[in-house]
Image (spheres, rainbow, N blue to C red):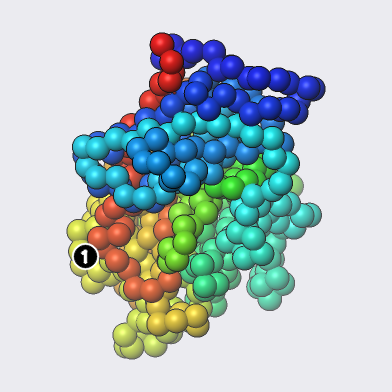
Amino acid sequence: MNFRVLAIVCLTGSTIASPVSAESWLIEVSAGNHDRQGTPLTCELPDSLKVDPTRTKVLLTPVDGAGLPPVEGQIMPGERDTLRWRLERPLKRGESRRYALRIEADASSGPMTCTESADHLEIRKGTRLVLRYLKTPGPEAAANEPYYSRTGYIHPLLTPLGQSVTGDYPADHPHQHGLFFAWTNTEFEGRKLNFWDQKGQTGRISYRSTGDLKSGGVVGQFTVSQRHEDITTPDSPKAVLDETWTVTAWMNQGDEKGTILDIVSRQVCASSSPLQILQYHYGGMAIRGPAEWFNPDKDATPPSGFLTSEGLTRIDGNHSRPRWVDMHGPSGKGDEAGVAILSHPDNFRAPQWVRLHPTKPYFVFTPMVEEGFAIEPGPDHAHVSRYRYFVHDGAPDPEQIEKLWNDYSDPPSLKLIPSQP
């Protein structure tokens, strides 16, 4: 795309003294094949638009009606800067809408904040905790065998009303940790490694370092790296995979009863040796629900449930290949709460198989149910996985989750247009 140079009226150091001309650019959003409402939007920006997002505010004014209030956006610096915002009102299938872009000097912070401490990273909306990523073992670790200690996962993950949809160190399976990624049946340099079941003490996954943290009016985001290690020789662990997570939480709108979260995992070999992911019935991107969603009495009806995009449940949905799965259970903040997880259509072997446990509140997207594969050395062979989460209060709403799926799998098209020839 050929971008017209965007006119910046005045620059003093890195501070914008006057706003960018509102007539310089328009952004057109085309709904495409689906009706849209509240859709998360991301638009690449021209290289000419380089501003300090901590000292500016981005406003998008709809041009399809006089007097409509502007929508706040957020510039995300990167190799190619992007602008993020959420669609503020419905846009029908086949229709389009244009916004005039305006950049104003504003050093105030937005409601979505990402912060780091010695023990964890947090994303909050105002004072409300959205999620916590653990850099050091959580408080439950001390009550378990040392080999169950783990870092590099999310817990708690909370609904807008404050109900956690994750659990940690459950008594029945203390190797399951919140929202986590682990391969189960693998082979590395001729040795069998299990990164999922820590009791065997063959594989370990740990937090390593923190990358960029971003806060603003639309999203809170962080990037972290973690390492998968071969610990069959405890005195000399060997790096197997280096993994990065980019975690993005979108601000919910008005009385919206859920929070949208995106996670991108990128795994690359940490040495010249490949990792063989062997055929197995579970392993991959997983989630464990809270303790109150589990009844140890195997003859009792489980208090939690699953619903897939094909209308299947834990009874008939195991090892099906859904586009999304919702896990839900009782809530101390209301009747019910849950989390829908959407697997991106570009994921390896999509739609991926899922392991839905018959009694326990956990499931995992598992691309090696029928056949194994290998993660080969070299950056060109990265194993990239993308998932969108909708963490909600109330019972699952299949119609709403389908709309989220359409936004994720077939998003609106965006176009930057010079407003003057």
Q: Residue at x 39, y 35 (%)?
A: 63
Q: How many marks?
A: 1
Residue 32, horizontal then vertical, whole percent: 25, 36
- Quadrant where the N terminus sits is top left
Identity, as a three-letter code, of the amino acid under mark 1: Leu
Q: Residue at x 48, y 46 (%)?
A: 69
368 left or right of 209 in image: left
Which residue was labeled with disc 1? 312
- Quadrant where the C terminus sits is top left
Residue 203, horizontal then vertical, whole percent: 58, 50
Would residue 128 be seen by someone viewing this image from the given angle?
Answer: yes
Q: Residues within 10 Å of mark 1 (few under 14, many from 20)?
A: some
The outermost residue toward the front is: 66
Would residue 206 be seen by someone viewing this image from the given angle?
Answer: no
Foreground pick, 168 / 412: 412
Q: Secondary structure at mark 1?
A: loop
Residue 317 falls in image quadrant: bottom left
Foreground pick, 313 / 263: 263
Q: Residue at x 64, y 42 (%)?
A: 214
Residue 322, horizontal then vertical, whole percent: 26, 53
157 left or right of 52 in image: left
Residue 46, horizontal then vertical, whole percent: 52, 19
Q: Residue at x 54, y 38 (%)?
A: 59
Q: Is residue 351 above or below residue 393?
A: above
Foreground pick, 354 / 100: 100
Foreground pick, 178 / 202: 178
